[in-house]
Image: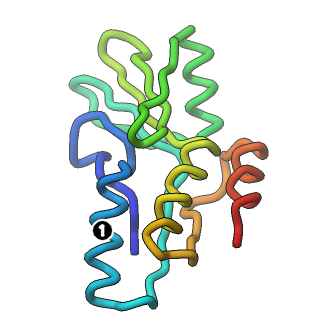
Amino acid sequence: VMLYNLYGGHSGPGPKASAEFIRATLRKARKHLGDDVHAALATGGYVWMEGMGVQSVTEKQAFRRLKEADAVSHRDPNSMAIYADLSGWEKMWFADGMTLQHWAQICRESGVDSISIWRLGGNEVASVDKYVSLAP
């Protein structure tokens, strides 16, 4: 079950997934598929540029953009995703290792232990290590 793109190119700014989105999607999946549910979580994120569309970013690209813009980042308490205003017209949301840990924990609490990561590459090594450390 794909547990991402709650927000993306089809919407305004926000995290790829939230706690409620993950729980609700897994409830529906388990209702129809029983215990044979495999969860897919996504790395990276998006930059929404007013009047210019949406651009996907890897975790490394996101951290680079934060540094280049000298932007202050924040962590959303619901999704644990990082977000920042890069300028008056650029908004960025993305996942890091802490985000992936949080999402994986919600999956496990929802009875789903089989979890994959979508789109490795462009990730910080520490982020992948955080996720791998949670493997059952």
Between 99 and 27, which is closer to the camera in this rendering? 27
Q: Position of residue 54 (x, y in %)?
A: 33, 37
Crowding near the residue tagged with mark 1, few <14, some 14–19, many ≥20 C-alpha atoms within 10 Å: some
Q: Residue 99: which quarter of the image?
A: top right
Query: Is 97 placed left or right of 21 in the picture?
Result: right
Compared to residue 30, the image places residue 22 above or below, namely: above
Compared to residue 38, the image places residue 108 above or below, namely: above
Query: Is 84 placed left or right of 89 in the picture?
Result: right
Compared to residue 10, the image places residue 48 above or below, namely: above
Q: Residue at x 39, y 40 (%)?
A: 78
Q: Which quarter shows the N terminus?
A: bottom left
Q: Position of residue 35 (x, y in %)?
A: 44, 89
Q: Residue 86: which quarter of the image?
A: top left
Between 34 and 86, which is closer to the camera in this rendering? 34
Q: Position of residue 95 (x, y in %)?
A: 53, 42
Q: Residue at x 29, y 46 (%)?
A: 7
Disc 1, SS: helix
Q: Which quarter shows the C terminus?
A: bottom right
Q: Which residue is mark 1?
A: 25
Q: Residue at x 63, y 25 (%)?
A: 64
